[in-house]
């Protein structure tokens, strides 16, 4: 890093690249601790821009916008992984930037990401990089049936095609416009987990408990903590591996690593790293309501050079993502019945201030906290019944 991070006291301005919901929750955490905030996002109605002290409406590579951000903010972070790594490198010439552009660049590219898992000694799914027709032709039949994923810019299951035969693979690559891709063997998943770690500039690592995640149509739907079907040994291994992955790239900031749990071939379970995000993660939103320090507060602490503390889960919890589909019923647009949902105990509603609902769009999330995991699950089921 060009600039060592020295502690920035509350009152300083913290900057974030991107103004989505993750940026909004970062701004909330930073402001709660007395920091001022600056958001750079071209969208005048971005969720974080709407709540920040300063909103710079500029393109992510606009030199004037980056200069304004570097002048306003004494340290800078990012809320999405597709921020141009070059923009972070440019900002790092003026201010401490965490995570660094080089780390974000690894997370932006599935091929680089998988190579990094390997370098960290962490297994991932069998795969092949496909950038040329020769590489396509040379793919091992062992990788089929598989999932062809664009190496860059994929999220929420977008940019992915399931393929069973070499002919389907060729057609899928054509459909994806022959951009660089990774073909991954399709694994029989027992379940999906994620681990969020925070690593300081001094190398100290803290982590949240392991999260168990359920995806629908490639989009996160439900996160449960404590993970109901994960034994202590597997959880410890997931935490250890997330830490190895962070340390191997000298990471500073909050990092989420997604894992698949698969059959180990001997009647047990094995862990396979799927992907990582160089920022707080949707599967960590529960930390706001169920932990004594949230993933967003740790993002603030990392970039401000403040001490990190090991988070403690104080309530068993279930997080439900609120997608735009909920704003439609019987073909009519509606407001979901929040008044009835909020009548249930331990329900925490988070809406991101997005003005228009679209199916599949993340509009908010809802956390249920309770004294026991069973009670949290029971209330979450009641919420689902009310939302329909
Ligand atoms: P995204 O960037 O869209 O989150 P992921 O690689 O995490 O992309 O894939 C989204 C979801 O698709 C995963 O959470 C998992 O449910 C499923 N999936 C992805 N890769 C595989 C695989 N190799 N085998 C089985 N399921 C997979
Ligand atoms: Mg994913």
Image: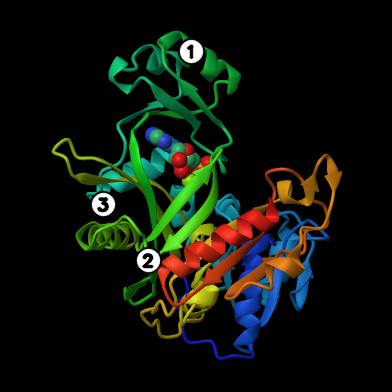
Mark 3 against mark 2, which lies toward the viewer?
A: 2
Question: Residue at (57%, 32%) from the top-left corner?
Answer: 159
Q: Position of residue 223 (x, y in %)?
A: 48, 58
Of the two numbered discs 1 and 3 on the same chain, state the one appearing first in sequence. Answer: 3
How packed mark 3 is, by other alpha carbons closer than 10 Å (few <14, some 14-19, many 20 or more), is: some
**Res 141 visible:** yes
357 shown above or below 5: above
Q: Quadrant of the N terminus?
A: bottom left
63 shown above or below 16: above
Badge 1 vs badge 2, beta-carbon distance below 8 Å: no
How packed mark 2 is, by other alpha carbons closer than 10 Å (few <14, some 14-19, many 20 or more), is: some
- Give the SS element for disc 2: loop
Mark 1 against mark 2, which lies toward the viewer?
A: 2
Distance from disc 1 to disc 2, alpha carbons, whole Å, reads: 40 Å
Residue of label 1? 168
Mark 1 against mark 3, which lies toward the viewer?
A: 1
Question: Residue at (29%, 58%) from the top-left corner?
Answer: 248
Q: Position of residue 254 (x, y in %)?
A: 45, 67
Residue of label 2? 226
Residue of label 3? 120
380 shown above or below 160: below
Question: Residue at (49%, 59%) from the top-left corner?
Answer: 283
141 or 108: which is nearer to us? 141
| Left or right placement of residue 90 versus residue 361 in this view | left
């Amino acid at each position: 890093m060009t600039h060592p991070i020295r502690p920035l006291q509350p009152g300083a301005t913290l900057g974030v690249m991107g103004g989505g919901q993750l940026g909004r929750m970062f701004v909330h955490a930073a402001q709660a601790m007395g920091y001022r905030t600056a958001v750079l996002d071209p969208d005048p109605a971005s969720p974080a821009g709407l709540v920040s002290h300063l909103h710079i409406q500029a393109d992510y590579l606009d030199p004037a916008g980056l200069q304004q951000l570097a002048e306003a903010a004494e340290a800078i972070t990012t809320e999405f992984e597709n921020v141009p790594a070059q923009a972070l490198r440019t900002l790092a010439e003026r201010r401490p930037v965490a995570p660094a552009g080089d780390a974000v660049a690894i997370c932006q590219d599935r091929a680089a990401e998988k190579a990094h898992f390997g370098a960290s000694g962490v297994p991932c799914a069998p795969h092949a990089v496909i950038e040329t027709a020769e590489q396509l032709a040379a793919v091992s039949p062992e990788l089929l049936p598989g999932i062809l994923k664009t190496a860059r810019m994929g999220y929420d299951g977008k940019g992915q095609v399931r393929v069973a035969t070499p002919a389907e693979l060729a057609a899928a690559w054509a459909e994806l416009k022959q951009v660089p891709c990774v073909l991954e063997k399709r694994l029989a998943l027992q379940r999906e987990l994620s681990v969020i770690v925070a690593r300081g500039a001094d190398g100290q690592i803290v982590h949240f408990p392991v999260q168990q995640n359920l995806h629908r149509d490639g989009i996160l739907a439900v996160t449960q903590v404590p993970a109901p079907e994960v034994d202590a040994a597997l959880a410890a291994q997931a935490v250890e591996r997330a830490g190895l992955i962070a340390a191997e790239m000298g990471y500073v900031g909050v990092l989420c690593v997604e894992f698949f749990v698969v059959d180990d071939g001997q009647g047990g379970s094995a862990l396979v790293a799927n992907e990582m995000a160089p920022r707080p993660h949707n599967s960590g939103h529960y930390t706001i309501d169920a932990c004594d320090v949230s993933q967003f507060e740790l993002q603030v602490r990392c970039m401000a050079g403040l001490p990190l503390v090991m988070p403690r889960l104080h309530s068993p919890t279930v997080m439900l993502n609120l997608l735009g589909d909920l704003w439609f019923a019987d073909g009519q647009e509606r407001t979901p019945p929040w008044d009835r949902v909020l009548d249930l105990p331990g329900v925490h509603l988070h809406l991101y201030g997005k003005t228009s609902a679209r199916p599949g769009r993340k509009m908010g999330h809802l956390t249920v906290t309770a004294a026991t995991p069973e009670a949290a699950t029971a209330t979450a089921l009641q919420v689902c019944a009310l939302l329909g």
